[in-house]
Amino acid sequence: MHRTIAAAVVTVVTAAALPFLGSSASAAPVSTTDGCIQSVPDPGTSAPVDICFTLFRPSGATKDRPVPMVLHSHGWGGSRTTDPASFAYLTDAGFGVLSFDQRGFGESGGQAYIENPDVEGEDVQGIVDLVAAQDWVGKQRPGDPVLGAIGGSYGGGYQFVGAFSELRERGSTRFDALVPEITWHSLTESLFPQGVPRTEWATALTAAGLSTDALPPIVLQGFAEAAATGNVPAYLHDFLDKNGPEWHVRQGRRLDIPVLFGQGATDNLFPLDQGLKNFRRALTDKARARSIFVGYNGGHTLPALVPSGTNSDIPVATGSDACSPQLGSPSFRDLGLRFLQHNLQGQKTGLNGFGRFHLTTAAGRCVAVPTVAPNTAVELGDVVSTVGVGAPIAYPVAQGPLTVAGSPTLDATLTTLGLDNRAFLALSVGTSPLDARIVQNNMLPIRENGVVLGKPRTGVELPSVAVDVRAGETLFLTVSPISDMSAGFGSRVVGAMRLRDVVLHLPVTTG
């Protein structure tokens, strides 16, 4: 059965988010094969599930002249790509390509378990087995193809679940290089930071599930309960807990292969910090030294109106990715091709920037930094916010010019008056508190249950950013009782929150 998702989920992914899906004319004929493999049954059932694919064999690929293979899969609610022109830039460069429908979507059967290692992890391993059986695909050794992968969002999730599942079961992965974009480190952190649902995205997923059977009933029930109560039920948290790199990292696993990360600084479903955590935590030191991180203004983007955000200032077609050109490629797609040529074909493409973070600022400038950890502490004194109702308050932090690129944190002593206290924090920029706007549209909650007096809170995460504060502008810390990214999920009871002796830790750079 073909399955689709609500148009709302598809249309908010900006053009910068899917650079690998462009088309171009192919200079050489490509043979195309459609088929399906059988994979493990859905949990609680006994019938094998079909996982369907389209295989693209470039001209000249033979047993005597084998070529590397690149896997591709779609975003949430999508389906595989069947047009050879979409992958001409790869097949013309001497790569085979396989695009497949993930479980629950397109022509594949079953339901979507959202990249569970015991389910979709087995699907991806089956696809790798299929690739390894092609005599025209290059091999490291029998059963181990020369293999890369591309895809964004859910199409990035399959790359991690496949590689980590192989690492868990085999002790190593058969993937040789990954190029994931706008994907997650932890689904629970992304969808429910501090246990506070991201309303608009949870609602979109729930709405999509009402018109399709792609999602298991437990997920639909969980999202509906979270929307009704403002709290995440334990069974939904448990369902999602294993479905990302963060769970594997907790088990002591790290990938020892090079990865080119693309992450949206303006993404408010899988924010910038999700990619940064993957780069910093999901790779070995050796792999990180061979990897590259690119942050661009794109991804899953929804406007921020309360409080007002800066996304409306960011050009979609120009300035969205300033770092790929700085690394010598006109687009992230072309950078990905060079990365695959470098790692799968051994070509000398002049690729550089390894082991560093290359972040496009809100104004469209590329900043390259070796670390995104804070290096500057600013004492703010006391910060006070109502919870439940009230207006955002912007507290001045520093005068421009300065550049902040990375992951800021906050330390404070917390006092609350209320039952379930929730306030939302973010950096903002403006000429005064009245016109300060949230950098790249992301806020994160600080939450405390019940009345507390003088409770220390350290290392509170603020949204990761890349922003130039110009001369005449001020960097602010905005504290708000509400955020439209979590509309309706602020405190249910009016109260107050006071942060005393606040110290803000900023990743300030001169790059």
Image: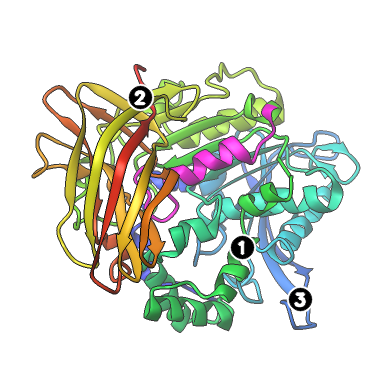
Query: Is 315 or 472 nearer to us in this picture?
Result: 472
Q: Are marks 2 and 1 in contact (CB under 8 Å)?
A: no
Can you say whether 366 is above or below 499 in the image?
above
For the record, the magenta segment spans 265-285
Q: Nearer the viewer, mark 3 or mark 2?
A: 2
- Residue type at tag 2: Val
Q: Tell me: residue 463, above or below residue 485.
A: above
In the rendered image, which residue does mark 2 sit on? 508
Determine the CA span between mark 3 and mark 2: 50 Å
Residue depicted at 50% across the width and 53% down the height: 153
Tag 3 and tag 2, C-beta contact below 8 Å: no
**Tag of residue 241:** 1
Mark 3 / mark 2, whichever is N-terminal: 3
| Mark carried by residue 41 | 3
Three-letter amino acid code of the residue under disc 1: Asp
Q: Quadrant of residue 238?
A: bottom right
Look at discs 1 and 3 and give the one toward the viewer. Answer: 1
Q: Is residue 334 visible?
A: yes
